[in-house]
Image (tube, rainbow, N blue to C red):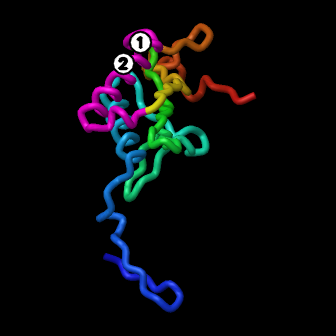
Amino acid sequence: MLTRHRGWREVTSASDADRPASRRVVLAHLAGQAIDRTPGVTATTGPAGRWQTVGSQQTIPGVLAVEDGRGRVDIEVHLVVRWPPPMALEQLGEQFRGHLRRSAGTAGMGERLGAVSVAFDDVQVGEVPVDDVQVGDARVGDVQADDVQVV
């Protein structure tokens, strides 16, 4: 327990580590686990790092969880897909939703889960070995530093 002085009185509260996670944070965490179980995708926090849920002592990247006034939590996930994807993007989104709905049901949170939106914000193309890249008539692996001119 933490004791804080507020004006002339002491206020005692549980530390962040002792507090149970909110429904919003629990569902965001389940969404993060569902991302990990979905093949060919990773979470992204976006260019400004805004696509994440912050709870007590944890941050869930790529997941925005918003609780409405009725206690339901809408989930929005932001993903990067590796190209080529293992299946159509629509199927990947449905697979993710299925993972999340099953996990929420198992955790007793199925009725609290609201809308689930999936956004594919970027594509990650597999790395191409440098020796396989062509520049004009020469292969990159064949080009020497003396052959390069800066213009």
Disc 1 secondary structure class: helix
Disc ID at residue 28: none
User: Which of these two is toward me, 94 or 144?
Assistant: 94
Q: Residue at x 41, y 31 (%)?
A: 42
Residues at discs 2 and 1 in contact (Cβ within 8 Å): yes
In the figure, 12 relative to 120: above or below? Answer: below
Indicate the quadrant containing the N terminus: top left, top right, bottom left or bottom right: bottom left
Task: Place residue 29 in its image quadrant.
Answer: top left
Q: Does the stretch in magenta take in 102?
A: yes
Q: Residue at x 37, y 74 (%)?
A: 13
User: What residue did someone put label 1 on?
Assistant: 91
Under mark 1, the amino acid is Gln
Residue 128 is at least partly visible in this image? no
Give the x, y percent position of residue 114.
45, 32
Q: Residue furthest bottom?
A: 8
Q: Residue at x 75, y 28 (%)?
A: 151
In the figure, 98 relative to 36: above or below? Answer: above
User: What residue did someone put label 2 on?
Assistant: 95
Q: Does the stretch in magenta take in 28?
A: no
Residue 115 is at least partly visible in this image? yes
Task: Place residue 113 in its image quadrant.
Answer: top left
Give the overall secondary structure of the magenta segment: helix
Mark 2 crowd level (few <14, some 14–19, many ≥20, 10 Å Cα): some
Q: Residue furthest left?
A: 106
Disc 2 secondary structure class: helix
Q: In whole angstroms, how far apart are the C-alphas of marks 2 and 1?
A: 6 Å
Q: Residue at x 46, y 22 (%)?
A: 81
Highlighted range, magenta: 86-113
Mark 1 crowd level (few <14, some 14–19, many ≥20, 10 Å Cα): few
User: Which of these two is toward me, 151 or 133?
Assistant: 133
